[in-house]
Structures are given as structure tokens and as C-alpha cells.
Image: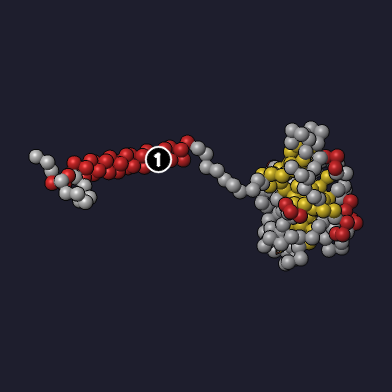
Amino acid sequence: MKHKYAQNPGDFSVSPETHQLTRRDFMTRIGLGSFFLTLGGVFTSIASFILPKMSYEPSSAFTVGRPEDFQVGDMKLLETKQAYIFRSQQGFQAVSAICTHLGCSYKPFGPPNPEYPTVHAYCPCHGSRFARDGRVLGGPAPRPLPFYHMELTSDGRLQVDKSVVNLTDELSRKTDEGVGHNLYLDPEKQEMVEGPLPDGSDCTPCYAGYEHTSQLQLPPR
Ligand code: FES
């Protein structure tokens, strides 16, 4: 017997067989979709477990030129990185240019005066003073200035890493904070070496006044 759905011209209803097929097809697609969604979730979980977490924070290490770009006695301010680079007989040092009180930029190191008889830096915000070796000489600053790790890159450039603060026994004896600043990057040995605590006596610009502090531009990468 012919089904009535096939006998009426103009009747566009779907036959039971077609309807049944479509529903089965639909259910199959739903099932497949669910399967692939679950599979995707499982792969995502595995990938996030295996792959390292990526951080897009700017690197704390940067290069500041080559040793031959500096002369013994130089003090150069790297304003963009808020650090001073010193070149003394012992080698190179990188020092934070930010006051440890509330984060102002302190004035470049200047000559001794009757009140502070050593090379020192002055913070104009609340009057903290820092010795060339980072110690707090006066004012509200709670900590010495941090000195950063330096090294030579494989192509001979000076690199500063602000994420590594130099700590030495000598330092801990000299300050309450255990921050020691008698480490220098020796460009000949190509490593940090211990030396005397810096007193600024060989810092040429320190005696010439603030306006003579040169600004160090970062070399192109
Ligand atoms: S921020 Fe330098 S003394 Fe307060």
C-alpha cells in the first residue's frame, strides 16, 4: 500500500522515513559534536599542564654598551632603566637610581660637604641621603640602594640584570639590611669580583656637579 504522503501533489510534509532519518542524523551530529568538544577540553588541559606558563613582562636584563665605551671614573645615568652605571678601577657597578623611601628619583651623586663628608646622593622628595656604597646616610629611606648583577654577554656587551641584587658577606657587615655593594664586574675576568666598598673618590662627575652627569642611551638591540 502506497503511503498517503506520496500521493498528494503539493503536500510537502516529510515522510515518516525521512523524518526518522533526519532525527537520527541530527542525534549523530549532536553526539559527534559533544565528543569533539570533550576531546578539545582534554587536549587543552593536557597542553596547559605540559607547556610552560608564558609571561610577557618586559625583561629585567638589558645591555648598556661595551666596556670600552666607559672610562674609569664615569658615572652614567640610564634614565629609562632608572639605574646608574659606575666605572671605577675595580670594574663596573649598576646601582638603582630610585630612592628606597617612596620611589623618587634621587639627584646624581655629588661631592662631599661639611655635613656629609663623602660622595653622596640627595633625594629631593624627603631629604634622604645615600653614600656611594648605597648606605643610607640620612633621611627617611629605610634601606640601602640595591646594586644589580652585571655580566658580559657572549658578544662582549655589558649586561645589567635588575632582577638580581648583589649580596655579599661584606655587604651584610656594612649594613643592617644585608645588602653588600663591594662586587664589581671585572671586564678582564668577565665575572663579578669582590673589591673595596666604593666611596666615590674616583667618580669624576661626582665632583663636577650634577649637570656633568652624562645620560646613557641604550644601544640598539
Ligand atoms: S622618596 Fe626619597 S626621601 Fe622620600
User: Would residue 38 be seen by someone viewing this image from the given angle?
Assistant: no
**Residue named by callout 1:** 40
Measured from the top left, where is residue 65 in percent x and y?
80, 42
Measured from the top left, where is residue 14 in percent x and y?
21, 47
Q: Residue at x 76, y 34 (%)?
A: 155
Q: Residue at x 55, y 43 (%)?
A: 54
Looking at the image, residue 25 sits to the left or right of residue 66; the answer is left
Work out whether 129 lies above or below 2: below
The residue type indicated by label 1 comes to Gly
Q: Circle 1 sits in a helix, a strand or a loop, which is it?
A: helix
Q: Residue at x 46, y 38 (%)?
A: 47
From the viewer's side, name the closer residue of 20 and 11.
11
Q: Which quarter of the rendering shows the N terminus? A: top left
The quadrant where residue 208 appears: bottom right
Q: Residue at x 88, y 44 (%)?
A: 71
Looking at the image, residue 39 sits to the left or right of residue 14; the answer is right
Q: Which quarter of the rendering shows the C terminus? A: top right
The quadrant where residue 104 appears: bottom right
User: Would residue 87 be seen by someone viewing this image from the given angle?
Assistant: yes
Ligand 1 shows up in the quarter that is bottom right
